[in-house]
Image (tube, helix red, strand yellow):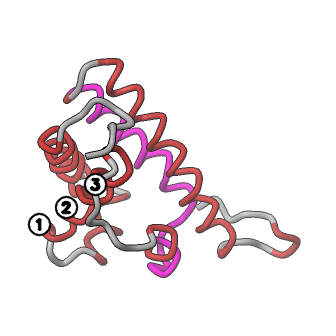
Amino acid sequence: MPEPRIEVSPEDIARVVARFYERVRAHPGLGPVFGRHVTDWPTHEARIVAFWESAILGLPGYRGSPVAVHRDARDVRPGMFAPWLALFDMTLREELPPETAQAWSALAHRIGRTLRAGVTERETLPGGIPKLI
């Protein structure tokens, strides 16, 4: 197994993902959007666990294109990423030691910027001005 980028275990990742998606489902803005696209929560969460295991631990198993998935959903807006990251940061702080939470948060924010840029490229007004909501 490669050296992890952040000191977390697969169990930590699964716990964070499960807690995060509990919050997402209850969120008034994010919950309905996810609810339109996720019909099988256990499968979705397992896929996201595999994503983080790949990104953090270097484990094989994740196949996919997060930017394409979020872009193709057609109802993910750039303004949704701030609350998404806030919920994720809250979950990290509650579930992990501070240094670990901070390191994972930094990675999540970098990934979030990439996702937001992918959505923003599709969602622009005339002259290339991004639609923020």
- Could you say whether the residue bearing mark 1 is in a helix, strand or loop? helix
- Residue 126 colored magenta? no
- Could you say whether the residue bearing mark 2 is in a helix, strand or loop? helix
- Measured Cα–Cα span from mark 2 to mark 3: 16 Å
> Counting other residues with Cα less than 10 Å from the Cα at mark 1, is it few (<14), some (14-19), or many (20 or more)?
few
Task: Name the kind of residue labelled 2 in the image.
Answer: Glu
Say above or below: 123 vs 46: below
Please, what is the dominant secondary structure of the magenta stretch?
helix
Say above or below: 28 vs 3: below
**Which residue lies at the image location 48% right of the left edge and 56% below the top edge?**
80
Task: Name the kind of residue labelled 3 in the image.
Answer: Leu
Check contact, mark 1 vs mark 2: CB within 8 A.
Answer: yes
Q: Is residue 62 left or right of residue 124?
A: left
Q: Is residue 46 left or right of residue 117?
A: left
Quadrant in the picture for residue 86: top left
- Measured Cα–Cα span from mark 3 to mark 1: 20 Å
| Residue 108 picture location, percent across and down | 44, 44
- Residue 75 colored magenta? yes
Q: Using the image, tell me which numbered label, if any, was put on residue 59.
A: 3
- Measured Cα–Cα span from mark 1 to mark 2: 5 Å
Q: Which residues are magenta?
A: 70-94
- Locate the C terminus and report the quarter of the image it occupies: bottom right
> Counting other residues with Cα less than 10 Å from the Cα at mark 3, is it few (<14), some (14-19), or many (20 or more)?
some
Q: Earlier in the sequence, mark 2 or mark 3?
A: 2
Quadrant in the picture for residue 43: bottom left
**Camera-side mark, 3 or 1:** 3
The residue indicated by pointer 2 is 45
Check contact, mark 2 vs mark 3: CB within 8 A.
Answer: no
Q: Using the image, tell me which numbered label, if any, was put on residue 42.
A: 1
**Which residue lies at the image location 69% right of the left edge and 70% below the top edge?**
121
Q: How many marks?
A: 3
